[in-house]
Image (cartoon, coloured by chain):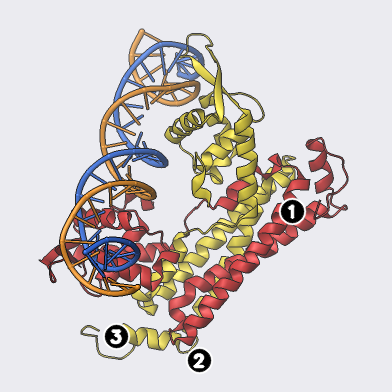
Chain colours: A yellow, B red, C orange, D blue
Amino acid sequence: MATKRKVGNLLALAVMSYLSQRPMHPYELSRTLREHGDARSIKFNHGSLYMVVGQLARAGYITEVETSRAGQRPERTVYALTGDGRAEFRDWLAELVAEPAHEYPHFVAALSLIAALPPSEVVPLLHHRLAQLHQARAEIRGLIDTTLARGVPELFLVEEEYRLALLDAETAFVEEFIGKITDPQTGWGATWAQFHGESGAPPRAGT
Amino acid sequence: MATKRKVGNLLALAVMSYLSQRPMHPYELSRTLREHGDARSIKFNHGSLYMVVGQLARAGYITEVETSRAGQRPERTVYALTGDGRAEFRDWLAELVAEPAHEYPHFVAALSLIAALPPSEVVPLLHHRLAQLHQARAEIRGLIDTTLARGVPELFLVEEEYRLALLDAETAFVEEFIGKITDPQTGWGATWAQFHGESGAPPRAGT
DNA sequence: GGGGTCATGTAATAGGTTACATGATTCT
DNA sequence: AGAATCATGTAACCTATTACATGACCCC
């Protein structure tokens, strides 16, 4: 299991990745991560970065190499990746590539409880979702295109292409789901509605 | 934004869902959640349940209705959903259905950093992932089939069918990705390998 | 030259997980 | 009877997010 890593936050992986190229100080990491757009793929916030850097240092994966100062700004501690850190980085990344993790997307949770809403409410909500999915798709598509146009190799955009693939699959699923609810042949909508006391049946007084 | 909910943990949604059917005490919730298999869709652990119940009570979404005792076992506090709780439950669930959330799956993070590994290493890892994906698919398929055979309506398995759809999409994506790396026409493998100081020879599976 | 915003970090708070505790029931 | 497991909950410990602090640069 992945729970045995000394530092579990994926932000640490990005930090190690950048430090594997050259030593940096935390704020530089922060800026680089934001500018490079990594925040789209790895949850990032200012405070967590310092926390993660501290954890990595305690774990021996990175070390201070100097504390320089430029002008009169507060001094910045520069960190570098250690040998252990490099090994951990490679191993962890390899694991993430090779082993699918069991995760808990919000929509899965919603689906697991969706029977608690009446189908007459659910169908419009699903249509709303479809619209949002299309919009998200267009945004990602645009991001990919403009980035490619700037000469960035496609390899550095695979994660966005993966998102596209998932979005498309979800879109198809939602459309099919709507179909199953509304198609009078399948009967889903009918029994589901009755369960909620809808569709001509008298309002329910409790199960 | 979803951050404004007084209680943010999705486990709270499941708790409210069960309490909307009848009052229960925490341990009963715990058992019911585990038995019903909700733990597959919503991250669950014993400690968090009590925390969430406390949060819901402080927020006014649930209230103690009695503290019964059976035999000499420690007394159990029974909670019921309030009107506010019912409203919050419906509203939250509706939002989760209608609004796609930006999430951070591990594989997205891995893909965003994958260029840090040489392609000769990545290809076998991806093949390993493919095998795992197939296995996961078979397990879910089996779970669905046996549950359906027990007479549970398909509606209560939509979340697993959604998972299947995502798994299939991911499988297709990974296969295509492997193709792009190994196909000597596209050149991905070559330039990527050179970047790592490897020979430009396209890597084949099983190196 | 005073009001924003950038650069840089620490501290306070809330959230979540693991470990611990303890009486009851059941098994052998 | 002693061991194991269930039932039930609390406490200790980490993690993560928000809020706060402060000197430097930049604009008008």
Residue positioned 72% across, 46% down in the render: A155
Mark drawn on residue B45: none
Camera-nearest label, 1 or 2: 1
Residue at figure coordinates x 26%, y 56% from the top left: B50
Per the image, the residue denoted by label 3 is A197
Residue that badge 1 annotates: B124
- Separation of residues labelled 1 and 3 (CA atoms): 54 Å
Tell me, yes or no, whether the two marked residues, 1 and 3, touch with CB atoms within 8 Å.
Answer: no
Compare residues C16 and A145 and report the one nearer the observer: C16
Q: Could you say where residue B184 lies in the image, as x and y percent from the top left?
A: 87, 52
The crowd level at tag 3 (other Cα within 10 Å; few <14, some 14-19, many 20+) is: some
Residue A62 placed where, x, y %? 56, 27
Q: Above or below — where is A169 with respect to B101?
A: below
Label ID, residue A185: 2
Name the side, left or right, on which A186 lies relative to A142: left
Front position in the image: A84 or B157: A84
At 35% from the left and 78% from the top, the residue drawn is A118
- x and y, in percent, of residue B102 in the image: 49, 53
* B182 sits to left or right of B20: right
- Amino acid at dot 3: Gly
Name the kind of residue labelled 2 in the image.
Gln
Kindly indicate whether the residues beneath marks 3 and 2 are on one polypeptide chain.
yes
